[in-house]
Image (spheres, rainbow, N blue to C red):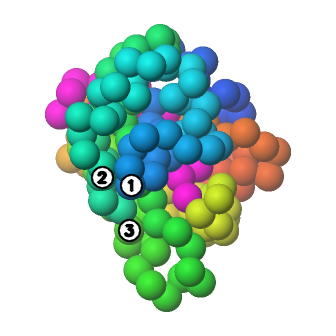
Amino acid sequence: MTAIMSVRQTDITVLAVDAIVNAANESLLGGGGVDGAIHRAAGPGLQDECETLHGCPTGSAKITGGYALPARHVIHAVGPVWHGGDRGEALALASAYAAAIALAQEHGCRTVAFPCISTGIYGYPKAQAAEVAVRAVGRALASAPAVEDVTFCVMDDENLAIYRGILGR
């Protein structure tokens, strides 16, 4: 069975899925944007568990419980800071998405929602990041039969149009 990939314009913290992905920083201790919103919505238990993980390198991911979120798990994926595209940013971003799918598979997550990793304060161009995301997730799903449904969760009309164009829906 081939997993379904779709896009939805909504707040990722309200999705009742097996796992939401957090656009985390290397400390995993919360920040701004999606990261801050997820930490606030999950409550203090998420922060407490993140403190036990001792960070996460760029291009990798770690998993925690969902706490007060409707999602069972939070997968913290650390994307790269954009430096113009010639410092391995695409590889690091693809690696973060692939690592998140691998953790979803390992923990039996059928439904996963991703934010737009690295496109906020990290400055990755939205269209380029979306291309990397869809390609990396598509490749990773070949090794993740448990993952049946992936939603790219966007907050603005621009990203919605970009993902619809890439996904053809």
Label 1 element class: loop
Q: Which amino acid does label 1 sit on?
A: Glu
Q: Where 168 sits versus 49, above or below? A: below
137 magenta-colored: no
- For marks 1 and 3, the one nearer the N-term is 1
Q: Nearer the viewer, residue 9 or 32?
A: 32
> What residue is disc 1 on?
26
- The residue lying toward the viewer, choosing from 54 and 3, is 54
112 inside magenta stretch: yes
Q: In which quarter of the image is the N terminus?
A: top left
Q: Name the residue under label 2.
A: 56
Mark 3 sits on what residue? 92
Q: Are marks 2 and 1 in contact (CB under 8 Å)?
A: yes
Mark 2 or mark 1, earlier in chain: 1
Q: Which amino acid does label 3 sit on?
A: Ala
Give neighbour class at mark 1: few <14, some 14-19, many 20+ (Cα, 10 Å).
many
Q: What element carries label 3?
A: helix
Amino acid under label 2? Cys
Single out the mark in the foreground, 3 or 2: 2
Q: Are marks 1 and 3 in contact (CB under 8 Å)?
A: no
Alpha-carbon distance for marks 1 and 3? Answer: 13 Å
Give the magenta part as a residue range.
104-118
